[in-house]
Amino acid sequence: MSFSKDSSRIFGLIAGFKFFKPLQKWINESYVKYFNIDMSEFKSPDEYESLNALFTRKLKKERNLDEGFISPSDGRILQSGETFLADNEFFAFSIKGRTYSVEELLKDSYEKEELKNGLDYANIYLSPKDYHRYHAPCDMQILSLTYTSGALFSVNEKHLFKIANLYTQNERVSLKCKSSEKGFIFWLVFVGAQNVGKMCFSFDKSVQTNMKIAHNFTRKYENLNLKKGEELGNFELGSTIVVLSQKGHLHLKPKTMVKFGEKFADFL
């Protein structure tokens, strides 16, 4: 745990360093080539002053937003479905054959009554090649933000098979949200990972992650409303977003690859 957090902080410092332009240009272009990144929606790689600036790149123009509940990010859906009850506790699959406790994942960001009928869920993995900003999937109100300290294990498929309950062991930030149109509760859980320097949130820049000394906390908000597609923040590098919704309000689309702006689910 200590090694993964220390290495992530060191990597974050290196990624944020601004090398002299010819070297930075070579670093950026090498990174884009190695991960085969499609830069057609972004500025040229040589225009970013650091690797971190490239990681957290913004779109050159806004994407069109589909109807319904849209994907909050680009990425790959590793697993989706309905939670199941075991020993009076709700579980979900991180990947086929591996589960995690929903209550443990959400920690202090839920009331027991809100989970009584179970949840629909999907795990979106953002690889190093993906667009790393995340957005509101619908018109919504953010009710609270819960920070939970933890390790920074890699969240790729190999490590999900290797480490039990990985999502619940890693550092994470849970946003408890309410759909403005339909009024149901859903959660967006941003899971930290190895070499993810930080998880940043546009609506509350005081939230700090990947710190040497970290304390769990929950912060409640009044009248914090966002429009569908509005930016929530960004990962530095890549990680996972777990989307959980009270059962019976969303019908998840059977997709593997998703893009921010594409329909993720239909409202029921």
Image (cartoon, rainbow, N blue to C red):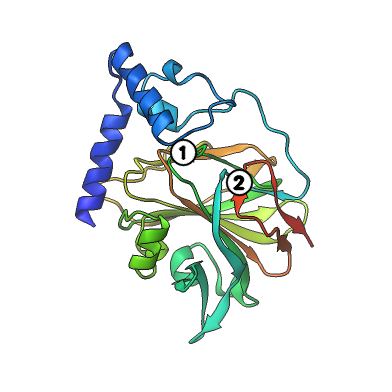
Q: Is residue 234 left or right of residue 65?
A: left
Figure label count: 2
Locate residue 261: give its quadrant: top right
User: Residue 59's spot in the image, x, y percent?
Assistant: 58, 27
Q: Nearer the viewer, residue 35 or 265?
A: 35
Q: Quadrant of the C terminus?
A: bottom right
Judging by the rendered image, the residue that carries numbered circle 2 is: 72
Residue positioned 32% across, 44% down in the render: 195
Q: Amino acid at mark 1?
A: Lys
Q: Is residue 163 above or below residue 75?
A: below
User: Residue 150's spot in the image, x, y percent?
Assistant: 32, 58
- Secondary element under disc 2, as helix, strand or loop, is loop
Q: Nearer the viewer, residue 85 or 130?
A: 130
Q: Which mark is residue 129?
A: 1
Residue positioned 65% across, 24% down in the render: 61
> Which numbered disc, 1 or 2, marks the residue that appears first in the sequence?
2
Residue 205 in view: yes
Q: Quadrant of the N terminus?
A: bottom left
Residue 107 in view: no
